Image: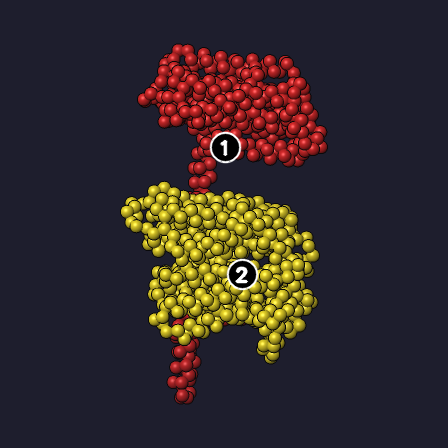
Chain colours: A red, B yellow
Amino acid sequence: MSALIHAATMVVAGVYLIARLYGVFYRGFSIAHGGANLVSVIGAVTLVIAAVLAFVQDDIKKVLAYSTVSQLGYMVMALGVGAWTAGIFHLFTHAFFKALLFLGAGSVSHAVHSFDMKKDMGGLRKHMPVTFWTFIIGSVALAGIPPLAGFWSKDEILLGASRNGYPVMVAMGFIGAFMTAAYMTRCCYLTFFGHYRGHGQPHESPPAITVPLGILAVFSVLAGLLNAPGISLFRKWTTTDVVERAHVPEHAFAVGPAALSVLVALIGIGVAYAYWFRDEGRPRVVERSSVGRGAYRFAVRKYYLDDVYTGGIVGSVKGPIAAGMYWFDQHVIDATVDGVATVSRAVAGFVYDVIDQKIVDGLVNATGATAEGGGGLLRIIQTGRVQQYAAILFGAVVIFAAALVLAT
Amino acid sequence: MNAFDHWALGAAVFLPAVAAGLLLLVPRAQETAQKAVALVFTVATTGVGVYLLTQFDYGNSRKLQFVVNNRWIDVINSRYHVGVDGISLPLLLLSMVITVMCVVYSWNHWPEPHNPKAFLILMLVLETGMNGTFLAQDLILFFVFFELVLLPMYFMIGVWGGPNRQYAAIKFFLFTLFGSALMILSFLALYFKGGQTFDMVALQHSAQTIAHSTQLLIFAGLFMGFAIKVPMFPFHTWLPDAHTEAPTVGSVFLAAILLKLGTYGFVRIAIPILPQAAHSWAPYIGVLAVIGIIYGALGCLAQRDMKRLIAFSSVAHMGFVMLGIATLSPIGINAAVFGMVAHGLITGMLFFIAGSVQERFGTRELSRLGGMLVQTPRMGWILGFCAMASLGLPGLAGFWGEFPAILSSYQPAAGLSLALFRTFMVVAAVGTVFAAGYLLWMLQRAAFGVPKAEFADAHIHDVHVPEYIAWTPLLVLILVLGLYPNLIFHMTDGAVHQALRAIGT
């Protein structure tokens, strides 16, 4: 449930924010000028590096999670290349098929009590047909095969990038489309094809789960048509003065790029099919070569980014930095405070023992006057700790008063 | 103005003192009678506060209201001058509410060595001092109340405190007294240089003729008095010891009210009377404030003891308040006053919880705690709520102290360095992440997981009735002020503009 809400709506809040404040970004990053800018680069990089991670996950929900990160990259890239409507349209269609896929993953885990595709899944298409078919619909929609939802929105992004003068982003978009189709093929294969590797007998989920899957599947098929050529309802609904004031260009559907993106997606599916479906059980590239193994480990460890964040940044702040600061606090600052107290007690002791008792009292005794009264009085005043401290306070007051008088 | 209006502020200040006097007459064995007297009088005092709330002229919050200005000490031209405006009012109410809740919380659990009579008397004297400080409009009167607060707290820590209480108590007392000594010198300088008056309102005009270099020195003295009380880095080291060693109620008073006397002093005295000097010192105050934010947060991350962690978090939170003050802008000072109230409620609550944890588990070591959500779910949830409020979650009170303070440093008062204050803004924003870090870390270790083996089979009581009664108003206020912060801002805004009048915003 949390994964569903999260992927479909919560995480896109950032995309929504950019879209809402688009005037700022459009001008600030000179999006109209083409080439490259920070927004589109961040989007494109996110799109590809997250897609790579989706290939190496064994947990079905993690595949979908990295897929979501990757699709967010698409959306941000769309906004970065000036394809405003395409960006939020992808946000809209993605919500349907990603919600469908997460619910499908939930349905599967409900049946096999696990999220691990390699250990506990496989061959589920026979046991849970509704989940299987709706999952396939979601995957195809995500891969961008027409006429399902993902095709229309992804195609608009690629078209916008090419018309607005962002050739690099077009290339990244195609790479992303290829990878998306491929990792979803892998995910479907590991979950639903081959032989069942789990325990017990998996069953199809109850209607409480399959009915929502069906509803979402319908939307995953149809949602893209909202902005299909000739309909363009979505554009009409979403056009606001945010976009109009910035003069963001809009582009009509074009057959050429659309055909190319479909071709790329099909190649992705084909390559993945050749890699995973055939020769089941044979050692793969990543297991045979050391370079392959290294690259695989690099991706499994998420480019070591988590280690840098938790180990490097959080670890050092929480560990040595906080400890060092606290040591400084206790042994330098607080030690100074205690030092002042110690010194004042020493001074007080000196004043009493030497000046008062030996010199003053000595003089008194020497003159033979009545010394007992005066000495006794002083002793009353100068025995407690508070009074000894107060001596230094008094000193501070005198110094400050002198400064005040001198300065005025 | 009806007859009671003339007496209202007097009642707000001296009802608790009257109760303390009455308690002296109650025999030591009659504890119920003692508690009843304390409760009745603190509730009555709060009733006066509510009366003030209803009668306060919000359209005129910049003006002192319910003013009483009588002869007091003629030889030094010091007068009994009290009044309440939009800055004083929320803090006065905070002080009244917190005192009632502390009496209620103490109902059945008195810290060792027991003696409720003496403890209640100290609480009541403390309330007189706190309320008086927030209402005084004469520097000598202010000083008397400001110092009056020290004694009860000294005894609370020194007699009812933890193992290291004597060290903590004398450190608290002397550190604060050191600042007070410099502060009274500045008061005297204001008197002699600013037209032979201690009247705060009159000084706002008559002190403007003082030479700038002298103003700077006078401000420095005031700064030492108030900054130690806040406390600002690097004058904060009395705080972790005092808060940790104090009995629960003492920690609540310290965190909720006593720290605010310092920040209140800046807003009430230092800035309106010496605006030019404040302007010159503001960048340095800002630097210390943001150091405090980061430094306090790092200090929290280094703690093993829950109560000491909460104590250190005060250094960070008061850093936000001081940053708001340092901007000398209306938004910043509004944020500061809101931050004082929010911190009072939230950190007061956190200290209550830490006290209840200590009482139940006999330890505050985070490594030994755990699983409160399983074992004492209600208290676990309350701790979670307060941790969220403390880290500045929007919708709860803490947010409205922190966020506008950060916002205000984008545009400080005219003439202050934009580059510098915008740097402060970034550092303070990083500080909010640290705050989330240490508070969630504390919550995880205290409340999540399963109870540790040593407490797994122990019967740990969840929230008691007196705790419910004491905590509910505070929790409700945290939520209500978070959802509708205007409750405070519409009081403070006029008064804040009045205080900043000479800065020219």
Q: What chain letter is assigned to the residue under label 1?
A: A
What is the secondary structure assignment of the residue under circle 1?
helix
Q: Separation of disc 1 and disc 2 at Cα?
A: 42 Å
Q: Position of residue A347 (x, y in %)?
A: 43, 70
State which quadrant residue B161 falls in.
bottom left
The residue lying at 37 percent from left, 61 percent from top is B108
Closer to us: A33 or A244: A244
In this figure, which residue is indicated by the disc labeled 2? B93
The residue lying at 57 percent from left, 69 percent from top is B8
Closer to us: A41 or A98: A98
Position of the C terminus of chain B by quadrant: bottom right
In the image, is residue B505 above or below residue A17?
A: below
Farthest-out residue, bottom: A369
Name the amino acid, label 1.
His
Name the amino acid, label 2.
Leu
Q: Position of residue B68 (x, y in %)?
A: 61, 71
Q: Is mark 1 in CB contact (under 8 Å) with mark 2? A: no
What is the secondary structure assignment of the residue under circle 2?
helix
In the image, is residue A39 above or below residue A285?
A: below
Q: Position of residue A402 (x, y in %)?
A: 57, 70
In this figure, which residue is indicated by the disc labeled 1? A6
